[in-house]
Amino acid sequence: MAGSRRRPRPGEVKAVAVDVDGTLTDDSRRVGLDAVAALRKVEDSGVHVMLASGNVLPIAYALSTYLGFKGPVIAENGGLVCYEQKVYMQGDPRKPKAAYRHLLTKMDAPRLFTDKWRVTEIGLRPVVKLAAVKRAVKGFDVDVLTSGYAIHIMQ
C-alpha cells in the first residue's frame, strides 16, 4: 500500500534515543516505571537505548546505568555524549560562559545546583525570565532556551 509505514524488521533498528525530562519523567520528575519496563525489553532485544537530557552527564549517566541501558548517553542538550566511558564534547563552553559573565552585569541570574558538574552550557534556575535573558545576551553566539526545568545558555 503506497505511503503506508511498516514495522522495522528484526535487526533494522540499532538504537532508540529517548528524552528523559518530561518524557520518561512526569511533571514531578518521577521516572515512569511502565516506560522503563518497555525500554528494558527494547534493550534486551539487542536494540541499544540512548538517554538524552538537558541535565548534566553524571545524572544522565547514572540514570542510564541503573536502568540497564547500554547506548550512548547524551547530556547538556547534546553538548556532551558519553559512550563506553568515553566523553565527547560537542559544544564550546567558552561562548556560554562569556554570555553568562555579561548577563551578570545586567541581572542576578542564579545557576542551577547541578551546574557544578555542567561543562558545555550554563543552566539557570527558572527564577529569571527567558525573554530577559535572551535580550541581555543578544549579540553573543549562543542559544537560550528553556526545558521547563531550567534556562539553558548554550552554543
Image (cartoon, rainbow, N blue to C red):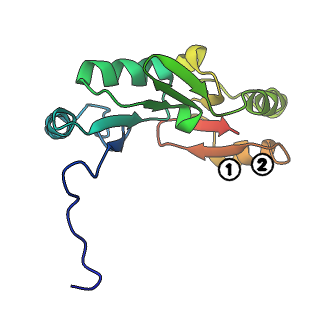
Locate the C terminus and report the quarter of the image it occupies: top right
Q: Residue at x 48, y 25 (%)?
A: 82
Could one spot residue 55 in this view of the protein?
Answer: yes
Residue 2 vs residue 30, the one in the foreground: 2
Question: Residue shown at 47%/43% (left/top)?
Answer: 148
**Residue at the (50%, 30%) spot, across then down:** 75
Amino acid under label 2?
Arg
The picture places residue 40, in percent across and down from the top left corner, at: 18, 33
The residue furthest bottom is 2
Q: Position of residue 139 (x, y in %)?
A: 86, 47
Residue 131: give its label: 1
Q: Mark 1 belongs to which amino acid?
A: Ala
Q: Does 54 sit left or right of 88 as displayed? A: left
- Secondary structure under the numbered disc 2 in the rendered image: helix
Viewer-proximal residue among 146 and 78:
78
Residue 25 visible in the shown view:
no
Query: Residue 19 appears at what percent x and percent y?
Result: 38, 42
Q: Which residue is mark 2?
A: 135
Residues tagged 1 and 2 counted as in contact (Cβ below 8 A): yes
Name the mark on residue 96. none
